[in-house]
Amino acid sequence: MRAVLTWRDKAEHCINDIAFKPDGTQLILAAGNRLLVYDTSDGTLLQPLKGHKDTVYCVAYAKDGKRFASGSADKSIIIWTSKLEGILKYTHNDSIQCVSYNPVTHQLASCSSSDFGLWSPEQKSISKHKSSSKIICCSWTNDGQYLALGMFNGIISIRNKNGEEKVKIERPGGSLSPVWSICWNPSREEHNDILAVADWGQKLSFYQLSGKQIGKDRVLNFDPCCISYFTKGEYILLGGSDKQVSLFTKDGVRLGTVGEQNSWVWTCRVKPDSNYVVVGCQDGTISFYQLIFSTVHGLYKDRYAYRDSMTDVIVQHLITEQKVRMKCKELVKKIAIYRNRLAIQLPEKILIYELYSEDSSDMHYRVKERIVKKFECNLLVVCANHIILCQEKRLQCLSFSGVKEREWQMESLIRYIKVIGGPPGREGLLVGLKNGQILKIFVDNLFAIILLKQATAVRCLDMSASRKKLAVVDENDTCLVYDIDTKELLFQEPNANSVAWNTQCEDMLCFSGGGYLNIKASTFPVHRQKLQGFVVGYNGSKIFCLHVFSISAVEVPQLFKECWWNSDLRQKRRPESKRKKGMRWLDVAAGQESAPMYQYLDRKMFKEAYQIACLGVTDTDWHELAMEALEGLDFETAKKAFIRVRDLRYLELISSIEERKKRGETNKDLFLADVFSYQGKFHEAAKLYKRSGHENLALEMYTDLRMFEYVKDFLGSGDPKEIKMLITKQADWARNIKEPKAAVEMYISAGEHVKAIEICGHHGWVDMLIDIARKLDKAEREPLLLCATYLKKLDSPDYAAETYLKMGDLKSLVQLHVETQRWDEAFALGEKHPEFKDDIYVPYAQWLAENDRFEEAQQAFHKAGRQREAVQVLEQLTDNAVAESRFNDAAYYYWMLSMQCLDIAQDPAQKDVMLGKFHHFQRLAELYHAYHAIHRHTEDPFSVHGPETLFNISRFLLHSLPKDTPSGISKVKILFTLAKQSKALGAYRLARHAYDKLQGLYIPARFQKSIELGTLTIRAKPFHDSEELVPLCYRCSTNNPLLNNLGNVCINCRQPFVFSASSYDVLHLVEFCLEEGITDEEAISLIDLEAPRPKREDRQRETINNSSQILQLVETKDSMGDEDPFTAKLSFEQGGSEFVPVMVSRLVLRSMSRRDVIIKRWPPPLRWQYFRSLLPDASITMCPSCFQMFHSEDYELLVLQHGCCPYCRRRKDDPGP
């Protein structure tokens, strides 16, 4: 660092304070009772300002540059505008000692001997605060939140914007060490606010905002009068009684002297955002200096060491960008680096560092030696075991222990020195002198070797990697290159300030100067590129350039991006396609010449071109080299170049060619044809293939490339098979390039129908599929089947059906109808072709079951002959109905099950089993049908059945229930209903019996109370039943008990009662059987004869319709006067417990009226059942489907209500059985 005086002036009075305008153009000085305004550029006094009546002690400029303030011993503050006009004045009670503007709010702090005030343009009054001691100095923090006050009693008070004290710092010296100057560090990079304090205890200290001291006090050995930070806070200026301004680091390390004066320095300031410093002295001298910070650095290959913040050393790895910092805490004067050594010269010592390891990327240094001695030198060089000190004409070689081993005295001043390598302890030095002499010195040899001597002074030197050439930059900015052996000047180039040889290539160097970087290879012309700075190294493809204080590694390919190649020779060698793409290079410095690598390529010197490329070229250049070598059949060089650009495609080609060469193939035309085909030169490749006798390879190449027109030309009028193959390949290509319609047409023309159909099906082109299917012959089953499959997938079942019909594939057609659920078409096809019955009805039944249409599903299974599945469906439906308490549905399903079993019983092998199941299911159907009314009565609040009906149903169920009560039927509910209805109808004895029976059963809680109450109340009733309720046997006219132990049969004649399926009262019907030998058909014919009877006025009316058979007798006279032959047959004598049925002969049958007989016409293997009505005037209806008997009025009402038979659910309009 050195200070250059820019200008100086002298005032009549002591300079008490200085303030810069924020833009740095003006300088305000407090001198005497005036303010002096200077132009900072040349020191011109612009204007003196008068306003104060006494000495002006302080001045401060606002951060926005709009106003400044001055304070005087006359106790007043004057606010001035930037136009140097006073606009406001206010006073304190004592002389003003210091003023400071808030950097954010522009609030002004003015401090006097006894108080301080805060003023801002928005305020009308000044807020003042008392002080315990005289305030000498003040300073605001960067954020404008706090104001630090330095007191005469050695105390520092930190206040907020309102003047309230937040922190109080008491200095050890107390009143013996007045705080004369303070300043906050303006750096924005610091994490904490740092306050620099200079007191007259001759100490410099640093504090945090909290009041905590940072480090120890720095002893100054003089009384400081002023302290000031640089704009970015990196340095501190300090002046005082030592009559000079000293430069310190931000940590308080003294770096040097800015300028020595003749009297005390009362004030010093740094010009904003610059390295200019102004100094004001007691004798009135004003000095304006420029500080010049020199670059202290060293470079060895890819390691660059430089000084930072004057006291630190940073070593930067230029390749990996790693950095390591070494804090020396003293001024760094010189730096030298060599291999694993680093030397740092400090004011009183030299530190020698070494790397921890030999790893090229290691950045960890440790101190190897310390030479504690003060040295004066111009240049410093470090070797493996020595340091070299250069002082004017003298070179000294010292060991790391500080012992001088050798000394060389030169004829002239040493201008340049560089270590050029060598064994440890025997390194060579390249030395350039002012008189133009260039020497080589070995550190272990006293004698210097003169390499050459030139007429001009040396500025920069470098030696080539082989030590055969020497590059010199002289004082005339000329770069001269010599042959060291012959001392011959090989060439020279102007406008150079530094030079460096490439460490990896003997013939390449670079030099900088005039704002350009110049690269020269061998005797080829220079290539130039704009670049600011100095070249300090050239390693491979990287050039290291120093610009101002930073060094950077620049990737320099051997061809510059902004250059265009315009060589006529090169243009002739390039294909037309590349010339159109503008692959030309124009050297802006050396005219129309090609770059070194291309010069070698023009001469077919591929290996030399590869060596140049290894120094660093772009990927484009590597590719160009690879292509040229490949066309020149230099496969070794081409392979290396393609590896560089990672072009696997060409590497595979080279590998295949090398394998073929190993197998003995030597046809260069064939090799070159393969190369041309890879490069896209297809016509040239085809010619070479043809010339080498491999026309098939040319044909294959053209077809693979879809260049079909060229194939046709190549084939001429060839084999039809080859033409068909060509069309197929052309279609494949059209398919791959997303032209499917064109591909379909080509496949059809080539006879590849399957491929055409696949494309149409994939794209959903139904019309094209139909067209193909209709054009195909029915014998071509595979494409037709594929067409039908795609049509089915594309939701076109009609066209798919048409295709299956064309093929005659009826099974697939049935499958299509089933899959698309077109059942009508399927049924129609099944009628014509019964062999597909199972294929239709089984899926149909499954579909019905999946859609919860179980009854239809059962019928479909039955129709398909799947009796097992039909029964399973019905059984499942029945179980579900019982579980869900839908007993009417359960009855219906059991009836259907019984009829299903009866149908199966026609098979002799299953007859007995199925008939047993038939009777069982018939019985369950009757039970559940009856129990449905009981369940509804007990569960629903309103019953649809009358008391007599419920009474009859209860009795019917009790008489009919087997020992094992069927699932879902509750005896409690039956007995409870019987008890209630018996009591209501006057059958008290039966009611009492029912209540007694209930006591032995488990009764649900909801019935408990009602049953207990009924049990008690029935005790008050008579112990007999109403005679009106007693059932009568119509065969023997016997009155039967209400509760019959024999069941639903007469206790006298054992004749089974016939019940109405709605009211469950006993019908006036008597079942009779035919005598042996009489068939059902004969019996019907005899009954239909109906012989006339005497004395009978016949007014009978018989109504037979589709849904019922009704008998009605309307007689007004005694029509039964004569004895009826059937009545005579009813006579019965009590004599045994066996039931004797009524047997009728032909004579009896002939005497019967058709209107009095009801016949249950069961299908085989069951026989018909015959019933004779004994009360012809009471009409009875039998359902022709389930053969259940009803009173005609009840049946007609139920059919009207439900639209069907209440038992078997036969619709009113369904045809008879």
Image (cartoon, grey):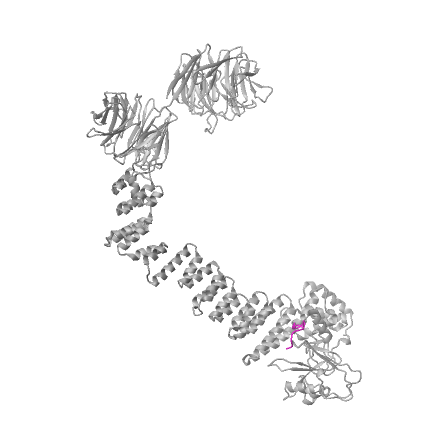
Whether residue 44 sits left or right of residue 1035 in the image: it is left
Residue 401 appears in the picture as rendered: no
Q: Farthest residue to the right: give it.
A: 1117
Residue 321 appears in the picture as rendered: yes
Whether residue 1203 sits left or right of residue 41 in the image: it is right
Q: Decide whether the magenta segment is chiefly helix, strand or loop.
A: loop
Query: Height in image: 430 above or below 280?
Result: below
Task: Classify residue 573 by image quadrant.
Answer: top left
Residue 705, position in %: x, y? 36, 54
Q: What is the span of residues highlighted in magenta in the rendered image?
A: 1204-1217
Whether residue 2 sits left or right of residue 177 in the image: it is left
Q: Farthest residue to the left: give it.
A: 486
Task: Classify residue 1184 by image quadrant.
Answer: bottom right
Residue 1209 shown in magenta: yes
Q: Quadrant of the C terminus?
A: bottom right
Nearest to the observer: residue 964 or residue 1210: 1210
Nearest to the observer: residue 208 or residue 112: 112
Nearest to the observer: residue 734 or residue 397: 734
Query: Height in image: 382 above or below 646?
Result: above
Residue 453 shown in magenta: no
Q: Quadrant of the N terminus?
A: top left
Residue 1016, position in %: x, y? 75, 67
Residue 404, position in %: x, y? 25, 23
Residue 1096, position in %: x, y? 77, 86
Task: Classify residue 1182 by image quadrant.
Answer: bottom right
* Residue at x 45%, y 69% (from the top left corner): 778
Count all numbered tags in the image, as a single digit. Answer: 0
* Residue at x 24%, y 54% (from the top left corner): 665
Whether residue 815 sits left or right of residue 730 in the image: it is right
Nearest to the observer: residue 482 or residue 906: 482
